[in-house]
């Protein structure tokens, strides 16, 4: 029976076994993968809900594994965090993405609303890495990209109960003009009063909120919650970005609720940088 000896069941399950091997295999292959250039970045546009213009994009890393094909970040970021490889990998992602932002600026100039901005995810391990601020400064200087064209996304859970030591590098980056976004907002235990203490300028509302809006008409309680979060965020001078927007009805709903920026399959799936070029270009030419 299944209930008898979970251990034996697991050993007898070839799939679970393969998963274990793969996990171990992936972990040992990670450092060489970085040297061999097996990682690449897809970009997903962030769109202003007011006028539908492209504000910028989020960088999302992928691993083109020689045997397993393209692996999503959920498959390897936890392993990279566990082994410490996330520090050099995260630095690589930041450098590549900021270079990409410079290329966008070269193509489109500064536009009427400033250059396209780049959002980069920061893992909690990178926050505690002492080189973070200097490395970020170096990357911006090497590429000639202004700090306000960069937004670093940190998850709410990484900052829960954060002490001053953890917040210090973020504060310094924010003082330089780098935007800090609180990612996956609303999934953790949200101490709303705590928000005032954090050097963040953007709340990124988790996909679960947008999902709750998928049925039509949307649950009125869900709407009230989002409305309340937006009001609170705006009263604290924070912009609100929503992720996981999959339909035009959701986009319209979120726009009505006062959200500032949106991201999701409705606009574009994550893709190569040229896809953003097309969107931004369509934008520029009306
Ligand atoms: P995230 O930061 O919450 O990123 C958004 C995720 O939602 C992405 O998954 C994106 O592909 C997916 N998504 C976007 N629009 C939609 C939509 O309309 N519907 C649905 N169902 N999903 C949508 P992805 O690319 O698999 O990334 C997963 C997570 O991996 C990210 O979640 C982020 O936490 C992490 N990640 C990605 N790149 C990096 C990185 O360079 N560094 C670190 N530390 N973490 C990364
Ligand atoms: Ca993110
Ligand atoms: Ca997120
Ligand atoms: Ca998420």
Image (tube, rainbow, N blue to C red):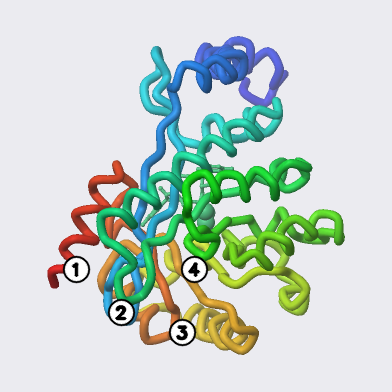
> Looking at the image, which is closer to me, 52 or 227?
52
Horizontally, residue 84 falls left or right of residue 268, namely right
User: Could you tell me how far apart the alpha carbons at marks 4 and 3 are, in whole angstroms?
Assistant: 12 Å
- Say which quarter of the image contains residue 114: bottom left
Q: Residue furthest left?
A: 285
Image: 95 above or below 171 = above
Q: Determine whether the beta carbon of the residue marked 3 sits less than 8 angstroms from the nearest atom of ligand 1.
A: no
User: Could you tell me how far apart the alpha carbons at marks 1 and 4 are, in whole angstroms?
Assistant: 31 Å
The mark that comes first in sequence, 2 or 3, is 3
User: Could you tell me how far apart the alpha carbons at marks 4 and 2 are, in whole angstroms?
Assistant: 14 Å
> Looking at the image, which is closer to me, 221 or 48?
48
Position of the N terminus by quadrant? top right
Disc 4: which residue: 209
Coordinates of residue 286 in the picture (x, y in percent): 13, 72
- Say which quarter of the image contains residue 166: bottom right
Of circles 1 and 3, which is in front?
A: 1
Image: 91 above or below 67 = below
Coordinates of residue 123 in the picture (x, y in percent): 65, 45
Horizontally, residue 279 falls left or right of residue 251, namely left
Disc 2: which residue: 252
> What residue is rendered at 30% in x and 50% in y?
269
> How many numbered badges does the structure rendering display?
4
Coordinates of residue 180 in the picture (x, y in percent): 61, 63
Mark 3, secondary structure of its residue: helix
């Amino acid at each position: 029976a299944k209930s008898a000896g979970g251990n034996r069941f697991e050993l007898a399950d070839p799939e679970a076994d393969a998963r274990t091997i793969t996990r171990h295999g992936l972990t040992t292959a990670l450092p060489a993968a970085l040297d061999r250039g097996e990682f690449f970045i897809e970009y997903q546009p962030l769109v202003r809900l007011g006028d539908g213009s492209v504000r910028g994009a989020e960088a999302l890393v992928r691993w083109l594994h020689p045997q397993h094909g393209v692996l999503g970040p959920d498959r390897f970021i936890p392993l990279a965090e566990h082994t410490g490889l996330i520090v050099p990998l995260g630095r690589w992602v930041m450098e590549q993405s900021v270079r990409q932002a410079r290329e966008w600026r070269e193509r489109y100039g500064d536009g009427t609303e400033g250059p396209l901005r780049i959002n980069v995810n920061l893992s909690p391990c990178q926050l505690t890495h002492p080189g973070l601020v200097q490395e970020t400064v170096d990357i911006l200087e090497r590429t000639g990209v202004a700090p306000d064209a960069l937004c670093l996304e940190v998850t709410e859970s990484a900052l829960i109960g954060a002490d001053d030591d953890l917040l210090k590098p973020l504060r310094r980056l924010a003082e330089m003009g780098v935007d800090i976004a609180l990612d996956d907002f609303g999934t953790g235990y949200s101490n709303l009063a705590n928000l005032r203490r954090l050097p963040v300028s953007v709340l990124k509302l988790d996909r679960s909120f947008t999902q709750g809006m998928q049925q039509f008409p949307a649950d009125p309680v869900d709407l009230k919650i989002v409305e309340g979060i937006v009001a609170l965020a705006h009263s604290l001078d924070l912009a609100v970005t929503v992720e996981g927007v999959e339909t035009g009805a959701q986009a319209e709903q979120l726009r009505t609720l006062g959200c500032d920026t949106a991201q999701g399959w409705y606009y574009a799936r994550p893709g190569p940088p040229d896809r953003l070029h097309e969107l931004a270009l369509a934008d520029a030419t009306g």
